[in-house]
């Protein structure tokens, strides 16, 4: 187990390192460059040169990289265009997106797994067809459009929920949830559709397996056969899928936050682009990539706990 | 069915397989509907200049935010532009992005995946790590970065969507190549002294085609929705060029006045991606031996 984790953590470190190189190179490839951006309207070469010198941008690229990554490792991502520390801005925005993502994963997993289990157990019946059809619709519908439709229905027409904005949970828990319901549902539906399909097919496989037949032969209740034996083995698939959907979740959060005017990490990314704030963008992308890798590492760990065979073969992808 | 056709089909196994697949496909009504509807969208995109009642930018200031009527099938937007015509024109951006992004992803991913799966060893390890790095960047972040570096446009959005779709395809192609290299006919070709290029092009690639076709029908609707998202955010098609995403972005300001402006483009995106998904499901059922029992 220890060796397996070490190998996985090592691979994750390499990925984070490569990602940081990509981010660093990407920021240098941006038109204008950071010095010109900091200079603003002032394009006087001597001013630009002074800025370059002040920020160490006249040094060779490897030196700049080492300096940048050294600061980043100590939690210093530099100052954005408004001279505010990037790391601090990111840290204040992340909890908002984490709450949104948590609620979305919760809604998506519960809906997806329950629908998937029902569809598999009642294979070929009406409920199976209904669940399969909804999953197909959930996969095909553009989620940001679903968000617009929900705003029209529940905010504009019915006045049940606010159309957008954010209230922190600490300030007002009820209002916080009122603001989060629609975004979380919008973000969760895509996940639930993917999960429903995967759960259904995983359940169908495990329901046909020998250990389920054995469990039935022992006279266990159907509830226990499905819940304890079939579902537990299907959960391995579910964990992987949730992990793999993380990228889609980050992308989804960007647009969901944009539609519902939630000041989270996703909106921060778009703000960085809008304002051409390269230091901010660099920090945001680095944090997003690192977060993605870390969560995938966690998924690998959970996966190996659920499926001991993985620890031996050492590979997650079958 | 003429006599000659029948014998040709029984003698030529490839023709027989094709006929069998066609028969199996036609037995799936949903897949047929998917094929018909997706082809309709492709045709609408190609024929937009011919069939659209108005040009994409034509304004009618006597009918601003008009309801549907004989003159304007789906009404008009805030500039008096015909919504139905703009949806037809908008199909161009969506289909273009969907098909080209998928083609780009295939062109990049398949050779890389085949080489990784066929040669294994350090090549495979390096490619696997690189794929992990690519996967660490959600496609929207890649698209956002590209838009920042190259400027927002349909082409750059398409490139971003293609790059975003590539890692998953690399994994699929690698997995297929890994399995195919153990097949007897590949070993026979190796024993016969065939060159690597010949083996990969003549034996490995053709045998993973059906899997790749299914992957393409999954990737196309994803890219269509992706294009809408990017254009909606202002990172893809730039107004006044019509695109479903741009139309939705414009409609956002009129949600209470004219919600229909937000409804129609969304339905177009939904139907278009649903039709490709239905087609993909049908193709998977008939082409993938693991799901046909």
Image: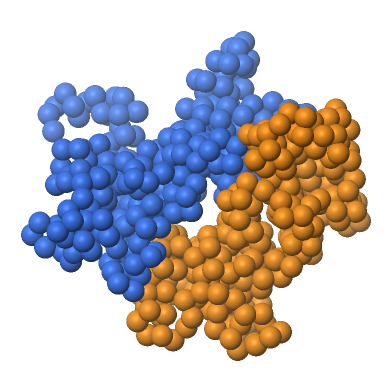
Chain colours: A orange, B blue
User: Which residue shows up at 11% across the image and 63% down it?
Assistant: B69
- In the displayed structure image, the side of residue A307 where residue A272 appears, left or right: left
**Residue B170 image-quadrant placement:** top right
Up the image or down, A53 lies above or below B265; here it is above
Left-right relation of A183 to B253: right
| Quadrant showing the N terminus of chain B | top left
Image position of A179 with respect to B211: above or below: below
Residue B21: where, in percent of width, then height?
Answer: 32, 40
With B5 as the anchor, is B99 left or right in this view?
right
**Towards the viewer: A20 or B121:** A20
Q: Residue at x 64, y 59 (%)?
A: A268
Residue A97 to residue A271: above or below: below
Q: Position of residue A316 (x, y in %)?
A: 72, 51
Q: Quadrant of residue A52?
A: top right
* Residue that protrudes farthest toward the left in the picture: B70
Depth check, front residue: B130 or B19: B130
Residue A118, visible in the rendered structure: no
Closer-to-camera residue (A257/A188):
A257
Whether residue A301 appears in this view of the structure is yes
Q: Is residue B65 above or below residue B213?
A: below
Instruction: Look at 39% across and 53% down and name the residue there.
Output: B245
- Across and down, in percent, residue B274 comes to 36, 55
Quarter of the figure with residue A226:
bottom right
How many badges with numbers are in the image?
A: 0
For this rendering, which residue is in front, B66 or A296?
B66
Residue sitting at 21 percent across and 56 percent down?
B80
Residue A95 coordinates in the image, percent (x, y): 71, 70
């Amino acid at each position: 187990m220890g060796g397996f984790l070490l190998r996985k953590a090592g691979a994750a470190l390499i990925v984070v390192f490569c990602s940081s190189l990509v981010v660093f190179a990407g920021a240098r490839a941006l038109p204008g460059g950071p010095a010109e951006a900091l200079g603003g309207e002032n394009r006087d070469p001597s001013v630009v040169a002074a800025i370059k010198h002040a920020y160490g941008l006249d040094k060779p690229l490897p030196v700049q990289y080492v300096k940048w990554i050294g600061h980043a490792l100590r939690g210093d991502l530099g100052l954005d265009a408004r001279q505010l520390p990037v790391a601090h801005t990111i840290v204040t925005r992340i909890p908002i997106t984490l709450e949104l993502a948590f609620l979305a994963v919760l809604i998506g997993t519960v809906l997806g797994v329950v629908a998937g289990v029902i569809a598999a157990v009642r294979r070929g019946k009406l409920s199976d067809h209904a669940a399969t059809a909804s999953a197909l619709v959930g996969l095909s519908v553009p989620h940001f459009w679903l968000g617009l439709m929900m705003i029209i229905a529940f905010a504009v027409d019915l006045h049940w929920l606010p159309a957008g904005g954010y209230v922190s949970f600490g300030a007002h828990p009820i209002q916080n949830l009122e603001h989060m319901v629609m975004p979380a549902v919008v973000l969760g539906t895509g996940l639930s559709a993917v999960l429903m399909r995967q759960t259904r097919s995983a359940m169908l496989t495990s329901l046909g397996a020998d250990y389920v037949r054995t469990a039935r032969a022992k006279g266990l209740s159907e509830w226990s056969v499905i819940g304890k034996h079939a579902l537990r083995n299907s959960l391995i698939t579910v964990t992987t899928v949730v992990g793999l959907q993380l990228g889609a979740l980050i992308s989804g959060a960007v647009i969901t936050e944009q539609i519902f005017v939630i000041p989270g990490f996703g909106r921060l990314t778009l703000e960085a682009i809008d304002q051409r704030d390269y230091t901010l963008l660099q920090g945001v992308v680095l944090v997003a990539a690192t977060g993605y890798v870390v969560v995938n590492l966690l998924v690998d760990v959970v996966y190996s706990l659920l499926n001991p065979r993985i620890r031996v073969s050492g590979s997650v992808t079958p | 069915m003429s006599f000659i056709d029948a014998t040709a089909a029984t003698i030529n196994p490839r023709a027989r397989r094709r006929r069998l697949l066609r028969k199996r496909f036609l037995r799936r009504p949903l897949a047929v509907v998917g094929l018909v509807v997706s082809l309709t969208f492709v045709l609408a995109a190609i024929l937009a200049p011919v069939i659209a009642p108005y040009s994409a930018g034509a304004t009618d200031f006597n009918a601003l935010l008009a309801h549907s009527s004989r003159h304007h099938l789906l009404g008009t937007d805030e500039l008096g532009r015909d919504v139905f015509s703009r949806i037809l024109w908008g199909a161009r951006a969506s289909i273009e992005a969907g098909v080209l992004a998928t083609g780009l992803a295939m062109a990049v991913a398949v050779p890389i995946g085949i080489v990784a799966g066929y040669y294994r060893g350090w090549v495979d390890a390096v490619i696997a790590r690189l794929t992990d790095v690519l996967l660490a960047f959600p496609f929207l972040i890649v698209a956002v970065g590209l838009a920042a570096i190259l400027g927002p446009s349909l082409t750059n959005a398409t490139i971003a969507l293609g790059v975003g779709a590539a890692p998953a395809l690399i994994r699929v192609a690698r997995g297929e190549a890994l399995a195919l290299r153990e097949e007897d006919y590949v070993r026979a070709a190796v024993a016969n002294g065939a060159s690597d290029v010949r083996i990969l092009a003549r034996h490995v690639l053709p045998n993973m085609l059906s899997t790749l076709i299914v992957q393409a029908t999954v990737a196309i609707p994803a890219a269509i929705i992706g294009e809408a998202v990017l254009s909606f955010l202002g990172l893809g098609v730039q107004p006044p060029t019509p695109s479903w995403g741009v139309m939705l972005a414009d409609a956002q300001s009129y949600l209470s006045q004219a919600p229909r402006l937000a409804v129609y483009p969304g339905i177009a995106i939904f139907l278009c991606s649903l039709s490709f998904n239905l087609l993909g499901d049908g193709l998977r059922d008939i082409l993938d031996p693991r799901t046909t029992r």
